[in-house]
Amino acid sequence: MEYSFYDFLKLLGSLALFLYGMKIMSEGLQKFAGDRLRKILTVMTTNRVTGVLTGVLITALIQSSSATTVMVVSFVNAGLLTLSQSIGVIMGANIGTTVTAWIISALGFKVDIAAMALPLLAVGVPLLFSGKSNRKSIGEFIFGFSFLFMGLSLLKTNAPDLSKNPEMLSFVQNYTDMGFGSVMLFVLIGTILTMIVQASAATMAITLIMCANGWISFELGAALVLGENIGTTITANLAALTANTQARRAALAHLVFNVFGVIWVLCLFKPFTMGVSWFVEDIMKTPDPAVAVSFKLSAFHTTFNICNVLILIWFVKLIEKTVCKIIPQREQDEEYRLRFITGGMLSTAELSILQARKEINLFAERTHRMFGMVRDLLHTTNENDFNKLFSRVEKYENISDSMEVEIANYLNQVSEGRLSSESKLQIRSMLREVTEIESIGDSCYNLARTINRKHRSEMDFTQKQYDHIEQMFKLTDDALSQMIALVEDEHHTIDVNKSFNIEHEINNYRNQLKNQNVLDVNNKEYDYQMGVHYMDIITECEKLGDYVVNVVEAGSNVKEKKA
């Protein structure tokens, strides 16, 4: 018992190494290759067909569909691939893995990437301790990549070794004469086996042994292969445990794709297996039954996956919608991906400006949401909830930095095209808007940090201070709502003066509270340190108000010129 428990711990440890590798690899990728890799992947996956071919190519090269799908999940997690692009690559990985089955049956040759993991670590160490952040990120990626494959290899090593002791499975002979019930049972056994062994190639080897020994017929071997197709998706779903919503959706898309394939093949099971048998026996003319059965299984595996891709490649959008319904976007997990600006430029510069406009509107809404989190943070007393909310504000601050850079780069690209003088003015004002909206994000983060400092101290604000802060927050929130309405106002129906009036109110209220604070500290209503935190919040709100007015001015200048 003790020994088997130790084995179980080793299995869990292998899984931990695998998940940790996935996390580091994804982070390293994000830091280093962001734009460059995204451009390469965007070119490689411009449409469904090239996406599928990319998947086939990568899987045939690294000979592990699990490794490909895990890498795809980590690319999605790092925001380098969109969900629909990833579905195409995963479809291709399913075809690529059948190449491995043929290589195993024909050559018995398999590249062991795990053997390269340790030498790779030796390459990664100096990079990891390098002073340059780029090299450091490459080092992190190499470490993650190595850990990932070491974990994958250890998972296989520490899984119960059934391929060495197939006798353990000889009991299945008792269940081979239940007609279609046997087929369903063997699909289930194939799924569970692959989940345990963590390698469809290993389960394929077990299936070949069982068929060659005559324990089960080719039809039931084919049912095991169908089960393997479902079981192999567990690796990507395990990798997605630590990932964000989009990555979990990509892993689920893999499962949906394979389960749907298995369902339609089960409906046509008899004709499908008879067709494969006829092809191997009559066309390939393989007289030796042991060799014939291994070729039949490989042919069945390949035909099934190719047909499945040919059917489902037309339904990528539907699969995407389905997985988005099953796994909704969690608010706190909001992904940093530009929604309207993807790939390169649009056909005309004017259209590109329109896309950038939509992205700026979204950016403004995100900073408003961030301010809402800061308001909640002030009244959060539970330590755990407070830390969660604070780290969410931090995440939003990083998102807003990245959005500023990406939108600004895009606008600069657009400005290099042929533009009317009106559009040039528009781009100039949009660049200013982006900078000021990012400053609003910084202000929100500064507010959160001040609230965090107050939270860490033993003291609290007085009720009067809370009332004043609330009133200031309300004014600031009004300013932000008005700014968003103006930013999104295409028909110039909203009065700009309302924004300037709110700004005057904020300034007057700040001056009033500043004078009041000096009196309150002198009268010992609260101590000096609390006064500092309190005024930091009030002053930061006033600064935020200034940035809001700058955004409004930048937008209204262009609208006036247009008018």
Image (spheres, rainbow, N blue to C red):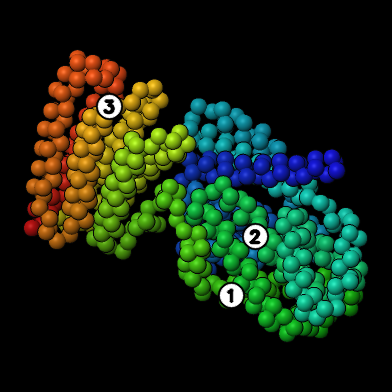
From the viewer's perspective, is residue 187 above or below residue 131? below
- The answer to whether residue 479 is visible is yes
- The answer to whether residue 47 is visible is no
Residue 510 percent coordinates (x, y): 16, 30
| Disc number placed over residue 233 in the picture, else none | 2
Horizontal side, residue 293 vs residue 350: left or right: right
- Under tag 3, what secondary structure? loop
Residue 110 appears in which quarter of the rendering?
bottom right
Going 38% across and 42% down the picture, which residue do you hit?
396
Residue 392 percent coordinates (x, y): 41, 41
| Disc number placed over residue 462 in the picture, else none | 3
Q: Earlier in the sequence, mark 3 or mark 1?
A: 1
| Disc number placed over residue 384 in the picture, else none | none
Residue 19 appears in which quarter of the rendering?
top right
Mark count: 3
**Do the residues under discs 3 and 1 have CB atoms within 8 angstroms?**
no
Going 67% across and 33% down the picture, which residue do you hit?
122
Q: Earlier in the sequence, mark 1 or mark 2?
A: 2
Q: Viewer-proximal residue, 218 or 291?
A: 218
Going 16% across and 42% down the picture, which residue do you hit?
549
Cα distance between the residues tagged 1 and 2: 19 Å
Amino acid, disc 3: Thr
Amino acid, disc 1: Leu
Q: Earlier in the sequence, mark 3 or mark 2?
A: 2
Which corner quadrant holds the N terminus?
Answer: top right
Horizontal side, residue 356 vs residue 61: left or right: left
The residue that label 1 is drawn on is: 310
Residue 9 percent coordinates (x, y): 75, 41
Cα distance between the residues tagged 3 and 2: 56 Å
- Under tag 2, what secondary structure? helix
